[in-house]
Image (cartoon, coloured by chain):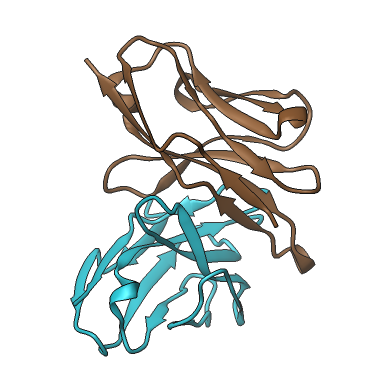
């Protein structure tokens, strides 16, 4: 059972570069989320989607973009990387929505911007 | 504004000892409450959740949590800790939004270290 798969697991970027973090899930969940985790700060919601073609901003969307062309995939795009985007990024999905149901997380993508 | 506070950043207990991790929330309506656990290098996994009914909920691996409305708390407990319980624990509150766009608000996390 694959669940939620994120790639890459590790990446180092230079300031100003761009990249896409990939996320795919095989559970046919409508709800998908991107979080970033910083030490001592818990998880902060970047973007979320309630279904294909629908996305919305979370708490910390600046510097990021998302798309949701299929139910399975929810890539996160970083434009013009900055050191403040050094973090661990988690993709998650849910059948009924994060506020009432279980969130299934990927293993995370550790990004360093130098 | 909705928020979750975990007062203890780091806790160390001896194997076999009891454990209580504290969680306080701020939310105007009846909360949906969760505890998630994160092992090193892994994503988070659901440990238990409270929606309504019995205020004492049982979860995976012998954990339980008690919802106390008067104290706005949802503390996690385990009677006897095992070395494999060493991990980071996150409390979260589910917040309703429009058109079922609810989200989770996470606390800062508590790192549990278990001494042999």
In the rendered view, would you say B106 is above or below A75? above
- Residue B47: x and y, percent? 50, 34
Q: Is residue B57 left or right of residue B36?
A: right
Residue at x-position 74% and y-position 63%: B97
Chain coloured brown in the rendered structure: B
- Residue B68: x and y, percent? 72, 27
Residue at x-position 47% and y-position 11%: B79
Q: Is residue A41 left or right of residue A111?
A: right
Q: Is residue B44 visible?
A: yes
Residue at x-position 51% and y-position 39%: B6
Q: Colour of chain A?
A: cyan
Residue at x-position 73% and y-position 48%: B27
Q: Is residue A101 visible?
A: no
Q: Is residue A56 left or right of residue A70?
A: right
Residue A76, image quadrant: bottom left
In the rendered view, would you say A63 is above or below A84? below
- Residue B23: x and y, percent? 57, 35
- Residue B40: x and y, percent? 27, 43
């Amino acid at each position: 059972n694959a669940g939620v798969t994120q790639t890459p697991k590790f990446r180092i970027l230079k300031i100003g570069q761009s990249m896409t973090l990939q996320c795919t899930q095989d559970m046919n969940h409508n709800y998908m989320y991107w979080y970033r985790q910083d030490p001592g700060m818990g998880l902060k919601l970047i973007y979320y989607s309630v279904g294909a073609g629908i996305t919305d901003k979370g708490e910390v969307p600046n510097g990021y973009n998302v798309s949701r062309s299929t139910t399975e995939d929810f890539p996160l795009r970083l434009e013009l990387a900055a050191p403040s985007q050094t973090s661990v990024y988690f993709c998650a999905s849910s059948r009924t929505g994060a506020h009432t149901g279980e969130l299934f997380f990927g293993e995370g993508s550790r990004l360093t911007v130098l | 504004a909705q928020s979750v506070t975990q007062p203890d950043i780091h806790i160390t207990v001896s194997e076999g000892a009891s454990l209580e991790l504290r969680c306080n929330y701020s939310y105007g309506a009846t909360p949906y409450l969760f505890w998630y656990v994160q092992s090193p290098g892994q994503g988070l996994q659901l440990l238990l959740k409270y929606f309504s009914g019995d205020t004492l909920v049982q979860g995976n691996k012998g954990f339980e949590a008690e919802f106390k409305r008067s104290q706005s708390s949802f503390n996690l407990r385990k009677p006897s800790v095992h070395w494999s319980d060493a991990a980071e624990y996150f409390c979260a509150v589910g917040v309703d939004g429009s058109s079922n766009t609810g989200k989770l608000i996470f606390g800062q996390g508590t790192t549990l270290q278990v001494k042999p």
